[in-house]
Image: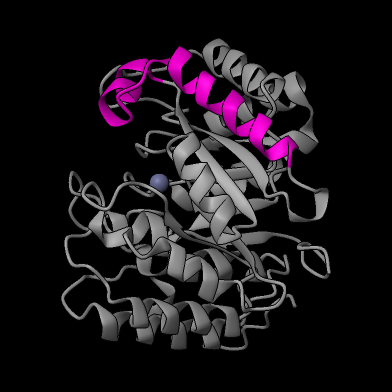
Amino acid sequence: MAILDGIDVLVSEVGPRDGLQSIAPVMPTAAKKVWIDALVAAGVREIEVGSFVPAHILPQLADTGEIVAHARQHEGLHVAVLVPNAKGAEAAIAAGAHKITLPFSASETHSLKNLRRTHAQVYEQVEIIAERLRLLPAESRPQFEGAISTAFGCTLEGAIPDDAILRIAGHLMALGCDEVGLSDTTGYANPAQVKRLVRAVHAEIGAAKMTGLHLHNTRGLGLANVVAGLEAGIRTFDSSQGGLGGCPFAPGASGNIVTEDLVFMLEAMGLRTGIDLDCLLVARETLARALPDEPLYGFLPDAGAPLGFVPAG
Ligand code: ZN
């Protein structure tokens, strides 16, 4: 079954990676498995389950190999991981991930601070990974995405010119990425900018090569940006259950856009996600039980669905 069969929009759950890496407590491996199982039971088709970074940097994700192995037992689930470099990609291949995402920070200052690498050095890693992947038989070759982070602005450099994003997107594709994604790492994006930049990237590399957006809700524009993305032809959105992780700079704001609210909005708009809202709320309970001291965000879980609400699918 192709991942988009029978649905209109792919909601890619990134809570087990983006959410968990942003909080201090380490979720026990067993609890992660229960949460992932509950997400799959709700109909989630793609989950970014972790990141292959050294355990001393992100102890929260030190069990990513075991989590990938567990997630792979779910028939049809697309198991995604983040990797910072070729070494991480090697671990992802060994674990059997279906999708490898390498973050490329559009802001070189941010890149130096976060990955300790210049743009040229990250491009070199992309090239090594692409060459390595080409050696694998097609049926076991993970999909390789270059995710352009700080694409809508950077806390260190401020605005990033659209031209810079287009150059990076073109270069990532030329070096062998299968596709490019845009990430609003800082929650700076606004709907007009999302539409403009998505259209520009589509014109540069082709619409089929840029299908996903990774949005944060730092300034409350997350779902507005989703609608702008939909209007520009985007069909995959990253979100995290309960907006896990929050935003350290904006108390009260979720981290990633909230999966529950995203699914509700899409289904209410007549767009099928394949996800059952009631089951998604059951998955949220497993998350809340595993991390009792972490605030979980979202409006739908508190307010409930409107009377007479009929999901799209
Ligand atoms: Zn993020």
Residue 120 is a magenta residue: yes
Quarter of the picture containing the C terminus is bottom right
Magenta-colored segment: predominant secondary structure? helix
In the image, is residue 280 above or below residue 159? Answer: below
Residue 206 is a magenta residue: no
Q: How many marks?
A: 0
Image coords of residue 210 (percent x, y): 69, 36
In the image, is residue 179 above or below residue 92? Answer: above
Q: Does residue 249 appear in this view? A: yes
Image coords of residue 13 (percent x, y): 51, 63
Point 32% across, 19% down: residue: 158
In the image, is residue 191 above or below residue 77? Answer: above
Point 29% across, 31% down: residue: 114
Q: Does residue 183 appear in this view? A: no
Point 58% across, 47% down: residue: 100
Q: Quadrant of residue 96?
A: bottom right
State the extent of the magenta-drawn residues as a range.
Answer: 107-135
Q: Quadrant of residue 17?
A: bottom left
Image coords of residue 128 (percent x, y): 58, 27
Closest to the observer, 135 or 284: 135
